[in-house]
Image (tube, grey):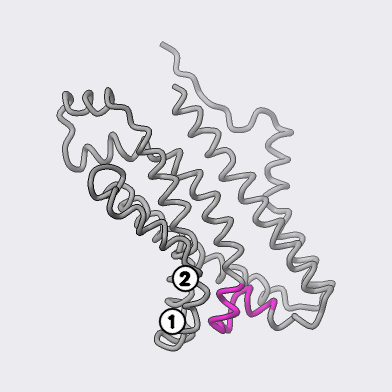
Amino acid sequence: MKKHRIRIYRSKRHLWITLLTVIAPFVYLLLFSQIAHIASAQLFADLLVSCWRLLVAYILAVILGWLMAVCFYHGKRAIVMLPFFDVLQSFPTFAALPIAVYFWGQTNFTTIVFLVLTVIWPIFFSILSSMKLIKHDWEEAVEIAGLRGWDYLRLFLFPLSIPGLITGSIVGLGEGWEALVATEMIVGMQTGLGQFFQSNATSTGVTVFGILGFLILIFVINKLLWIPLLDWSHHTMEE
C-alpha cells in the first residue's frame, strides 16, 4: 500500500511566502532599531532573553500540567483536587509577585516561576478535558492489550492528550506573552522586553512600534507553529 504523505509546502509560492513570514519580524525589528536609534544588538538580546524565559516556563508548565492531568483526570482524587486547582487558577498571581521578589530577589527564577503559574492552568485544564473524553471501550481495549506503567502513559494517555496540549499551549502562551513584559517590569529585571519598554516609556513612538513588532512576532509564531499543529492534531484524532 502506498503511504500518504502530507506536503507541508504545496508550491514554491507557498514556500517563499513562508520564508518571508519567518524573516518579517526580524526585518521589522532591524528597521525599527535603526529608525528609533536603538542599538539593534541590545534589542535582539532583550528579545532573546525574554523568549528564553518564556520557553523555560512553558516547558516546565507542560511537564507539570501533563503530570497533574494524568494524576487527577478521574477517580476520587479528581473530585477532591479539581475544585482546589480551580481556585488556584483564579488567584491573582501578580498580587504575590512583590512578596516573591522580597524572598527570591530580582532573578530569572522569580520571573520564570510566575510565568509558569500563568501558563500552566490553560494547559492543565485543556489536557484534563482531553483525557475526560476517553471512552470506556478504549480503556477496556487497553486492559486487554495489557498496557501498564510507562507503556500505558506513552502509548495511550500521551497521544490522547496531544489535542488538549496544543490547544492549552496556544491559550497559555497567549497569556504568557501578555504576562511576560509585566512580570519583568515588576520583578525589575535589567534585561528583557520589560526593561526595554520601561526604559522607553517616555517615548510614545518607540513604545507603539515596539508593541507592533511584539505582536508581529507572536502572530508569526502562531501562524507557522501552533495553527498547523492544531490542524494536525484534529486531523489525527479524526483518523
Label 2: few (<14), some (14–19) or many (≥20) C-alpha neighbours in 10 Å: many
Q: Residue at x 62, y 44 (%)?
A: 224
The image position of residue 119, as x and y in percent, is 48, 59
**For this rendering, which residue is in front, 72 or 224?**
72
Residue type beneath disc 1: Ala
* Measured Cα–Cα span from mark 2 to mark 1: 9 Å
In the displayed orientation, state which residue is furthest to the top: 1
Spot occupied by residue 113 in the image (x, y as percentages of width and height): 43, 71
Q: How many marks?
A: 2
Toward which corner of the image does residue 128 lie, by quadrant? Answer: top left
Between residue 47 and residue 20, name the one nearer to us.
47
Q: Say whether marks 2 and 1 touch (CB < 8 Å).
A: yes
Residue at x 18%, y 33% (from the top left corner): 147
**Can you identify the residue that label 1 sits on?**
100
Q: From the viewer's perspective, tell me whether residue 170 is left or right of residue 66.
A: right
Of residues 231 and 167, the one nearer the viewer is: 167
Asked whether, in this view, residue 226 is left or right of residue 22, the answer is left
The residue singled out by tag 2 in the image is 114
Residue at 30% x, 55% y: name it.
81
Quarter of the rendering containing residue 178: bottom right
- 83 vs 196, left or right, is left
In the rendered view, would you say 57 is above or below 194? above
Q: Quick one: quadrant of the N terminus?
A: top left
Magenta stretch encompasses residue 235: no
Question: Which stretch is magenta?
Answer: 182-197
Say which element carries label 2.
helix
Residue 211: % across, % down: 73, 66
> 222 or 49, which lies in front?
222
Q: Residues within 10 Å of mark 1 (few under 14, many from 20)?
A: some
Q: Amino acid at mark 2?
A: Phe
